[in-house]
Amino acid sequence: MTISKMDWDNKETSWDFEQLVLLNESHPLGEAYTNWQKKVTQDFFQLHAHEEELNRIFIDIYGLQDELTPEVALKDITILQEELDRKELERLEPIFREKGQDAIQLPIDRSEVISQFISYAIGLFMGRYRLDKPGLNIAHPNPSAEELASYTYNGGEVLIDEDAILPLMGSNCNFPDDALHQIYGLLDTLCGHDTRTENINFIQECLDKDLEKFLVKDFYKYHCSMYKKKPIYWLFSSKKGAFQVLVYMHRMNEFTAEKIRANYLLEHIKNLRSEEAMPSANESNLSTQEARRLEQIRKDIHECVEYDMELKNVADQQIKFDLDDGVTANYEMFKSVVAKIK
């Protein structure tokens, strides 16, 4: 297999994608990243050398020494398209030409690499992928019991979400299957519980932001970008995100909207009202910070109640759709209850 094909097939968007290469070792994430970086650096310069050698052969065969040079700019090497900073490669070009590849380090965007890891993790929770088998696991609305069954990996149990509905609210919700909690558990399975803090710190250092903030505020935008505005995970979200869940499109059916409402939205409203009760009873004695929190809870309740009316309307329609119609046409049928694709 060529280096270019391997690079392409390492992306989720390839038909031949099997597993995230970063996870081929049971090490702390930082170590796995370092080993991945060494491998892709070797591949990059090997491909570069091959391309320049082919140019030399072509020039010699056709006697074009006076018209062409064999050099290929680093920025024109086609692998690692998303992961490399091409402008920085241009800046490094003169150093590379003068001192060789050992004098430079490939400008890899660690945020992109870790975002790919988080995307793959979401796919594991949804059952799209499995750690113990290559390629797709579930990509249809009626998975079998076998496809949904939990499995053991690296001594730990990996659960596949039963309804492919994943809360995306972090510490603002009480659901055990929220994406943040599930990523913590996955890190424990992959690398061991003792390295959880180390792994979370590495993720946040790469993202240059808090993991929870990335999941709640940024993941969906990243996902839409990865899939060229044709997301396979849909974000069912209230107006300002007081309530939001990710849903795997390929596992949706006519009852999915009602499951979101009954199992998550109404429960979330109930939890918010419970959280509101105690400070409300002592409102005159609240600190400024506590008063602000109470005000936010009330705003969230109002937003979620409004969203419930919209979601109930969609749920009552029991919308069926055909995957062959594509994302755009199907997404349009849910436009009142899903986030805008950006």
Image (spheres, rainbow, N blue to C red):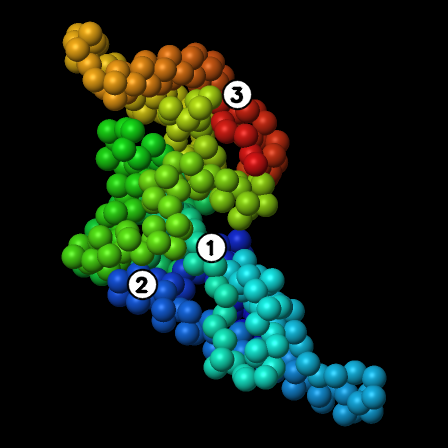
Q: Mark 1 points at which residue?
A: 112
Residue type highlighted by circle 3: Ser
Residue 8 seen? no
Q: Give the answer, above or below, for where 225 lies relative to 44.
A: above
Which class describes the residues within 10 Å of circle 1: few (<14), some (14-19), or many (20+)?
some
Above or below for 132 versus 6:
above
The part of the image, by quadrant, that contains residue 20 is bottom left
The location of residue 57, given as percent across then percent down, is 72, 89
Q: Distance between the residues labelled 2 and 1?
A: 15 Å
Number of other residues with Cα within 10 Å of mark 3, as a class: few under 14, some 14 to 19, many 20 or more: some
* Three-letter residue code for mark 1: Glu
Disc assigned to residue 336? 3
Is label 3 in a helix, a strand or a loop? loop
- Whichever of labels 2 and 1 marks the residue nearer the N terminus, that label is 2
Asked which secondary structure carries label 1, the reply is: helix
Q: What element carries label 2?
A: helix
Q: Position of residue 313 (x, y in %)?
A: 47, 14
In the rendering, at what x and y percent does residue 151 appear?
25, 52
User: Mark 2 is on which residue type?
Assistant: Gly
Q: In this view, does 183 lie to the left or right of 306?
A: left
Residue at image point 49% right, 80% down: 103
Q: Residue at x 21, y 9 (%)?
A: 283
Residue under label 2: 30
Q: Earlier in the sequence, mark 2 or mark 3?
A: 2
* Callout in the foreground (1, 3): 1
- Label 2 to label 3: alpha-carbon separation: 41 Å
Foreground pick, 288 / 299: 288
Residue nearest the observer in this picture, 200 or 236: 200
Q: In which quarter of the image is residue 170?
A: top left
